[in-house]
Amino acid sequence: MVSDNANPEQEAQLARETRLNLRASARQNTLIRLAAQAKNTTVTAFILDSASRAAEQVLADRRWFLLDESAWASFEDSLERPAVIKPRLAELISKESDIFDS
């Protein structure tokens, strides 16, 4: 996965490990090429950046959920309950580790 700090041009320079094949109509091809040129980037970088942003949005939308009043009340009750200290979890979190630094 690419760092959130990398800009699209930096991402375009990173080693790519897999190949995506796709077909496009002549109109789509022209449109994409013109847009890439307008952004002063390669067609590959333009497509990967655009597709990645769209994919992130689709996946982010999956984080939203709707509940009816009864389910919402139950959810709120769960949130309002006092925290339960889990000693083994507290111990694990307190250990110095670089697992969260990546």
Image (cartoon, grey):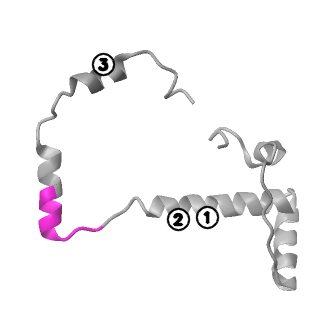
Nearest the eye: 95 or 27: 95
In the rendered structure, the answer to whether residue 51 lies left or right of residue 91 reads right
The reply to whether dot 1 and dot 2 touch (C-beta < 8 Å) is: yes
Q: CA distance from mark 2 to mark 3?
A: 36 Å
SS under mark 1: helix
Specify the farthest residue to the top.
96
- Residue 46, image quadrant: bottom right
The region drawn magenta spans: 66-74
Instruction: Measure how far apart labels 1 and 3 are at the Cα level.
Output: 39 Å
User: What residue is rendered at 75% in x and 49% in y?
Assistant: 8
- Crowding at mark 2 (Cα within 10 Å: few <14, some 14-19, many 20+): few
Q: Main secondary structure of the magenta part?
A: helix
42 sits left or right of 90 in the view: right
Quadrant position of the C terminus in the picture:
top right
| Between marks 2 and 3 in the image, the one whose residue lies nearer the viewer | 3
Identify the mark nearer the N-term, 2 or 3.
2
Element under label 2?
helix
Left or right, residue 20 beside residue 5? right
Against 57, is 15 above or below? above
Label 2 close to label 3 by CB (< 8 Å): no
Q: Which mark is residue 54?
A: 1
Q: Which corner quadrant of the image does residue 42 belong to? A: bottom right
Tell whether position 16 is magenta. no
* Residue type, label 3: Glu
User: Residue 61: percent from the left, percent from the top?
Assistant: 45, 63
Q: In this figure, which residue is indicated by the disc labeled 3?
A: 91
Please report the residue visible at 35 percent of the width from the left and 22 percent of the height from the top: 92
Q: Which residue is mark 2?
A: 58
**Local crowd size for mark 1, using a 10 Å CA cut-off: few (<14), some (14–19), many (≥20):** few
Q: Earlier in the sequence, mark 1 or mark 3?
A: 1
Q: State which quadrant residue 94 falls in.
A: top left
